Image (tube, rainbow, N blue to C red):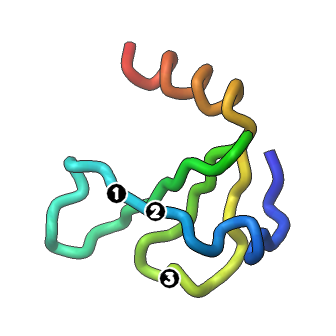
Amino acid sequence: MSTDQHTAETAGLDWFKSSYSGTSGGDCVEVAVGPGAVYVRDSKATGVKPVLRIARAEWAAFVRLAVR
């Protein structure tokens, strides 16, 4: 996982929030899928860095554990 600023890599990505986030503006993250990586950022501060860059295999392992 990397917390470097990946501005060029994240430009043009489609970001989405969980359907569980609601519309009240709580503490949420946004996720975008790019070539070879998944990116995660704070939904309240989308222009603020860092953006987490996570390898797809690591993200898949996280999701498998999270949905148990």
Residues under numbered marks 1 and 2 in contact, where contact means CB atoms less than 8 Å apart: no
Taking the image as shown, residue 16 lies to the left or right of residue 12, namely left
Q: Which mark is residue 38?
A: none
Give the amino acid type for the residue marked by disc 2 in the picture: Asp
Q: CA distance from mark 3 to mark 2?
A: 16 Å
**Residue ranking furthest to the bottom:** 47
Which of marks 1 and 3 precedes in the sequence? 1
In this orientation, which residue lies closer to the viewer: 37 or 48?
A: 37
Taking the image as shown, residue 24 lies to the left or right of residue 35, namely left
Q: Check disc 3: other Cα within 10 Å, few if <14, some if 14-19, many if 20+.
A: few
Taking the image as shown, residue 48 lies to the left or right of residue 3, namely left
Q: Nearer the viewer, mark 1 or mark 2?
A: 2
Give the amino acid type for the residue marked by disc 1 in the picture: Lys
Name the quadrant of the N terminus. Answer: top right
Taking the image as shown, residue 55 lies to the left or right of residue 64, namely right
Q: CA distance from mark 3 to mark 1?
A: 13 Å
Give the amino acid type for the residue marked by disc 3 in the picture: Ala
Q: Name the residue that disc number 1 marks.
A: 17
Q: Secondary structure at mark 3?
A: loop
Q: Name the residue that disc number 3 marks.
A: 45
